[in-house]
Each structure stands twice: as structure tokens, then as C-alpha cells.
Amino acid sequence: MLTRRELTLLLFALAVFVVAYNLDAARARLAPTPALSFSARALLGVQDLLSADGRRRAPYVDPLERAILGDWEVDARRTHDLGPHGVSADDQLKTWPDGNVPVTKLIAHVPGFTVLDNVLLVNGTLHLVSDHASIAFPRPEAILSTGLDSPYLPVLQNVRFLTRQKALQVLGYSAQRIAGTSLICFDQKDAIDSYTLLALHRAHAAASSSPTSTLPPPDRTIFANTARSAVSETGYALAFARAAFPYMVHLFAEDWADLALTARPAFLDRVLLADRVAAEHGAQAFDFAHELVAPLQAAGSVGDEKQKNGKAGVAATPIEATDKRLAFSPAFALPARANWATPVRAGVQALLLPPLPAGARRPRKALTYVAGGAAHLRDEDHAALARALRRLGDTHGWDVHVVERERGGTAGWAELVRAAAQSSVLLGVYGDALVHSALLRADAGPRAVVEFFPDGRFANENEFVTRALGVGYVAWRNTKKYPRGSLPPISPPTRADSRVLAVDVPAVVQFVKETMRRSA
């Protein structure tokens, strides 16, 4: 129990504290500052009241805000070099606040291969925006094969055409941007083969607006209907693609499904839409001489790769009747720079071949024989051919690479590609190994591919690719050779054919010798 004296002292101390506290607060209130010379209503009307970080600017800061938020200076926003295709955080959103939705532009087109700018993706459906879609774009079935009959599984995606007004209602005023160039392959797993990479790159190269300009490499390849785990079961070599385009990202059906489930629309700067079934259906009646769309049509004459316009450096491969059976052939009909395959060769060579020292002599001539595989030469012919080629190399000072493939399997990818990239001549039994003719040295004079077939059989996949590359070609059946211009009728090998082939070894070696002598 407090005494009267203790209670009086306690009340006196409390009174002194209250008076002192209010006096200090009154003094702070009576000391004018610029911030307190404005009412809250007046501050709302002040222009540039807040700085970039949300704090009030110096003339309007009171001590309480300074004590809480500090008075440190804001560093200038750092910028980073993102490379030629890098996208900063500010560029990841595409907006059209005025309601003018970007119009989709058709850049290049043949059946099954369509290059477009400004494409919107919503819920897995591609939206092409134009007020004149019927004349601005080809028929939908020439772009994607949705609904077409085919031995392959149907394409699951669709294309929708929107006017700008309808697009604004459906899409709103913004979309998440997917910058750069996207190569979207809609083929199912069974329709992807070893020629897919070259066809995609060839169609992409046709989007160049000038024969003298350098087209940036694609930023990503998307296999919309092929799972990541299933790509190894196709003919598409991821190692080859990554060597040719080290900065290109590969996305698969799982990633496409994620995009389809995203609520926000996606805006793609540029896309190549590739569909094998659409190419097969549309190519039969398509007039490649007059109906194709490409920016380089006016740059120079369109002709065989070897008959390129010297001034413009533009080339396209004429599509013959026998070529229309090849689903990838339409891509090569698009006019592009004559050296369209150079980036592929340069990327692979930079990865697998050591650079030459300054002043070093050019590497020796070389040839590559790809042996073995599911179909192969009979043992005595294989041994005789390998021995004769090595003897030929020793006599003339040429490097000879004999790449052994396991029967039913494949050779080490790096060994095969490294050998092809150093060679002028490539020999082998029919099959996907000869697609590496795209890597043959372009600085060593005439190049050639020799492809061995069973009696009575011939397929023109590799003949077409070599023609598009300006590479010589000979088909060989037993003792007879068929140079370009006198090729046998199309009759692709089947599983019922013998997998063991015979060839006239002395005749093959003589042809190789003549070709190598013509090399630079």
C-alpha cells in the first residue's frame, strides 16, 4: 500500500512526463518544413512528387519518412549486354494499349512450311490476326494438316484467323512475349526423320529479306507433338542440331502443353510452322514456280543451287515430279542465300575441328567411307574397298576416313561428323548417314556423294539433298553407276530386300580418284 507521500511523487513524475512529451511534440509541429507547408490535398496535386523508387522527393520529405526509408541515393538502373537476341525484363511483355493488335504478316510459304511474324498463341491454338485473312494467308490445310487423312497421327493443333477487333476481344491488350525466331515442328514422332533439321533450317533461311544480309540463327525449335523422351527414337539428331546452333533451345510436347495451359496469351515474334502431312498433301498440286511466297523472289533468278544468280547470290531448288514424294522437299524450293548451309557447317566445324594456326597450310584433301549399318556391303567387298581407298590415299597424299557403323546401330556421332567435315567425297550404303553431305568441305573444289543400293532399288532422298547443296551425286547398284541425269526409277528399298550389297570395287575407286583429282 502506497503512502500519501509516495503517491504524490508518482503523480508528479507522471505529470512532468506528459508535459515534457507534449512540449517536444509541439516544438516539432511548430518547426515548419517544406513537407508540412502542404496539406494532403495539396500534395496530391504536386507533379513529380514521387521518385522512381516510390519515396517522396527531397522538398517534400518529412523526418519520419527519412527515419524510416532513409535518404540514400538510388543507383542508376544497370543494363546488361544480353547479346543480339537477348530480351530484358522490360521487353518480355508485348502490349498494345491503343487497341491496335499487331497484324500477322506472311513472310514465306510453301505447303507445310510457313514463316509468319506476330503470331499469338492462346490455349494451344495459333491465332493469325488480319482484317483480310482470306487474301493475306494460304489455305489453313496448307499450313497445318489438322483433319487431313494421313498414315501418320493427326496434328493436334489448329489455326484460327481473327480480325483486329475480334482479336482485341479475345486476347485483351497484352501478351507474354516469346522473342526471336521459333521453329515449330508439328510432326508426330514417326514423321520426324534425319532430314528434318536441314529442312527446318532451309525454310528458316528463306526468311532473309536480303541476299547480302546475315539472318540471325533460330532461337528455339519446338516439337509440339513429340515428347522429350521420344526424340531419340526419331531420326532427328539433337547432337547435330546443338553443334550447328549452340544457342538454340529445344522444347518438346511437355513444354508446349505448359504454354497451352498458361492463361496469358503468348506473342511470338517470328515462327516457322512445319507440318510433314500438310507438305505431302499440298505439294502435289502446288505450282512451285508461281505460288510460293518468299522475300527474296525479287532479288535474283531462281534456279538450281549450282545455277545461282551470281550477283544476288540467291538460289532455290526446282521441285521435280519425283521430288514431291519427299515431305521435306518444299522447304528447298524457297529462294534463299546460296550459302544457306554455311552456318550448319561452321557450327559443327567450330565444335569438332581444331582451328588452324595463323599462316598454316590448308588441310589435306580427304574422303570418308561410311561402312556397316543395318544394310552393308558384303564382307569381301567392304574389305577390298577400304583397302583400295587407303592405298589411294597413301599414293596421292589424301586422308581416308573409314567410319565403321555397327550393324543395326550407329557409329559414334562425333567420329562420323568430324570425318565428313574434313572430306570432299562421302561414300556409303543408302540411309541417313549420308545426310552429312551438308558438312562436306566447300573450299576443296567439287564435292560428291556415292550411294550404294540393292539391285533394282533406288530412293532419291540423298540425291535431292545433294542437289540442293550443289554436291555431285552417283547412285551405285552392283556394277553399274547412275550419275545425276540418268538416275533409275524410284523404287525405295524395303525390309524384304537383302541387306547385304555387292559393288564393283575397282569402278568405285576409279570414280573416287577422278573426283578427288578435280578437287582444289
Image (cartoon, grey):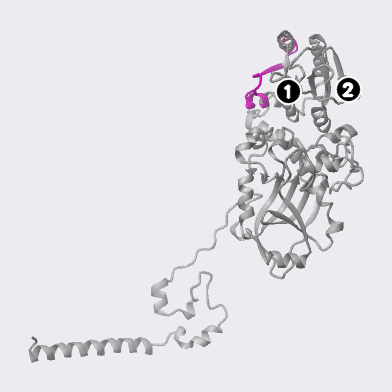
Q: Position of residue 94 (x, y in %)?
A: 67, 61
Asked whether 76 or 215 is in front, the reply is: 215
Badge 1 local density, few (<14 within 10 Å), some, or many (20+)?
A: many
> Where does label 1 land, which residue?
423
The residue mark sitting in front, 1 or 2, is: 2
Q: Residue at x 67, y 44 (%)?
A: 225
Q: In terms of image quadrants, where is residue 443?
A: top right
Secondary structure state at the residue bearing disc 1: loop
Q: Residue at x 90, y 37 (%)?
A: 303
Q: Amino acid at mark 1?
A: Ser
In magenta, the rendered stretch is: 392-417
Asked whether 146 or 379 is in front, the reply is: 146
Distance in Å between CA atoms under marks 1 and 2: 27 Å
Q: Position of residue 389 (x, y in %)?
A: 74, 12
Tell me whether circle 1 and circle 2 mark residues in contact (CB < 8 Å). Answer: no
In the rendered image, the quadrant that contains the C terminus is top right
Q: Is residue 427 above or below residue 220?
A: above
> Where does label 2 land, which residue?
488
Can residue 87 be seen? no
